[in-house]
């Protein structure tokens, strides 16, 4: 995401003719977009994206279960372990 934001910033500076970016070659201005595409391809191939999605889903499920147990009176708000 950071590479895309950097690419958008550099592209805007190049098109507006601002600062030293105006004189840079186009390949240097567009390079962050290629870097972002490369990173996303590597992240998908190695499973980083899927692991992060699974981690977020597990955390969401845990919070939902804790909230339901608390509403049912099975768990005190300050009790992190709950009763089993």
Image (spheres, rainbow, N blue to C red):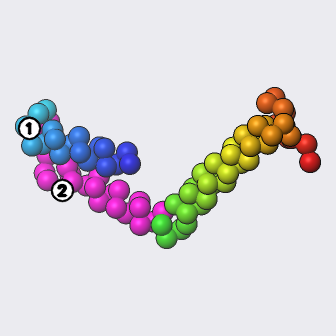
Residue 59 in view, yes or no: no
Q: Which residue is mark 1?
A: 16
For the magenta stretch, what is the residue range? 20-43
Q: Is residue 13 left or right of residue 48?
A: left
Residue 59 position, x and y percent, is: 66, 48
Report, in whole angstroms, how far the alpha carbon at label 1 lies from the one at label 2: 17 Å
Residue 8 position, x and y percent, is: 23, 45
Tell me which residue sits at (92%, 48%) in the image.
Answer: 84
The quarter of the picture where residue 27 lies is: bottom left
Tell me which residue sits at (17%, 45%) in the image.
Answer: 11
Decide: is 9 above or below 26.
Answer: above
Tell me which residue sits at (74%, 43%) in the image.
Answer: 68
Residue 81 position, x and y percent, is: 85, 41
- Judged by depth in the image, the label closer to the viewer, 1 or 2, is 1
Identify which residue, 62 or 56, lies in the foreground.
62
Instruction: In the rendered structure, find residue 27 and report the number of the disc placed on it.
Output: 2
Identify which residue, 68 or 57, lies in the foreground.
68
Identify which residue, 67 or 11, lies in the foreground.
67
Decide: is 47 above or below 3.
Answer: below
Provide the major secondary structure of the magenta segment: helix
Q: Is residue 17 left or right of residue 74?
A: left
The quarter of the picture where residue 14 lies is: top left
Tell me which residue sits at (34%, 57%) in the image.
Answer: 35
State yes or no: residue 28 in magenta: yes
């Amino acid at each position: 995401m950071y590479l895309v934001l950097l690419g958008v910033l550099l592209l805007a500076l190049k098109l507006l003719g601002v600062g030293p970016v105006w004189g840079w070659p186009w390949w240097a201005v567009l390079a962050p977009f290629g870097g972002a595409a490369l990173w996303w391809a590597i992240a998908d191939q190695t499973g980083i994206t899927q692991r992060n999605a699974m981690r977020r889903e597990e955390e969401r499920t845990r919070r939902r279960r804790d909230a339901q147990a608390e509403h049912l009176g099975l768990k005190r708000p300050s009790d992190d372990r709950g009763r089993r």
